[in-house]
Image: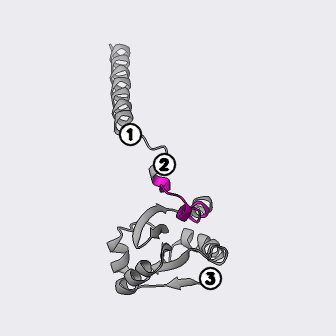
């Protein structure tokens, strides 16, 4: 399969709504990591016929990039049935390969990753505050 190049928001919306699995590469021509990962993206397009592959140049398709909050390149977004399913940024070949397996999963990768929940974040914040306080007490004792 070939990679589609789309830079119009209306064409983009039509494309993602008419295909069940679409993997989009938001890139820039001046972006080094984008250039590094581009041949691999093309290779994946040839070897994964169940997924449609699209490239959006963020400098030409600014309205598409803004619509999806793309701020770093490359950013890859997987759409299932017209809806954003998962995303990641960076030229990570392994992660891109994982994304090609996502259409068969019921849960996106970002929902099963090991992100701290709010309780563990709060605990880490409290631990850091205690360590800072202890450090302050040690410095105060050394100075006096």
Q: Is residue 66 above or below residue 136?
A: below
Q: Nearer the viewer, mark 3 or mark 1?
A: 3
Marked residue nearer the N-terminal end (1 or 2) = 2
Q: Nearer the viewer, residue 92 or 6?
A: 6
User: Residue 108, percent across and down?
Assistant: 48, 57
Residue drawn at x 51%, y 79% is 54
User: Residue 24, percent across and down?
Assistant: 49, 73
State the extent of the magenta-drawn residues as a range.
97-110
Give neighbour class at mark 3: few <14, some 14-19, many 20+ (Cα, 10 Å). some
Instruction: Quote the CA–CA distance across marks 1 and 2.
Output: 12 Å
Does the image show residue 21?
A: yes
105 magenta-colored: yes
Q: Are marks 3 and 1 in contact (CB under 8 Å)?
A: no
The quadrant where residue 136 appears: top left
91 magenta-colored: no
Disc 1 target residue:
117
Marked residue nearer the N-terminal end (3 or 1) = 3
Q: Is residue 33 above or below residue 61?
A: above
Disc 3 target residue:
1
Q: Is residue 139 above or below residue 122?
A: above
User: Residue 104, percent across and down?
Assistant: 56, 62
The mark tally for this picture is 3
Residue drawn at x 35%, y 83% is 9
Which quarter of the figure is the N terminus placed in?
bottom right
- Helix, strand or loop at label 3? It is loop
Q: Nearer the viewer, residue 7 or 15?
A: 15
Disc 2 target residue:
112
- Helix, strand or loop at label 2? It is helix
User: Is 48 displayed left or right of 113 in the figure?
Assistant: right
């Amino acid at each position: 399969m070939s990679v589609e190049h789309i830079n119009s928001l209306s064409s983009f919306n039509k494309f993602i709504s008419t295909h069940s699995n679409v993997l989009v590469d938001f890139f820039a021509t001046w972006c080094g990591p984008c250039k590094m990962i581009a041949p691999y993206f093309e290779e994946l397009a040839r070897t994964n016929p169940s997924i449609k592959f699209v490239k959006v140049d963020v400098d030409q398709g600014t309205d598409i990039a803004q619509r999806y909050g793309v701020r770093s390149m490359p950013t890859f977004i997987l759409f299932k049935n017209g809806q954003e399913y998962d995303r990641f940024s960076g030229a990570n070949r392994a992660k891109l390969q994982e994304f090609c397996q996502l259409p068969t999963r019921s849960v996106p990768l970002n929902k099963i990753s090991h992100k701290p929940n709010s309780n563990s974040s709060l605990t880490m914040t409290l631990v850091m505050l205690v360590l800072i306080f202890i450090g302050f007490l040690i410095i105060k004792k050394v100075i006096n």
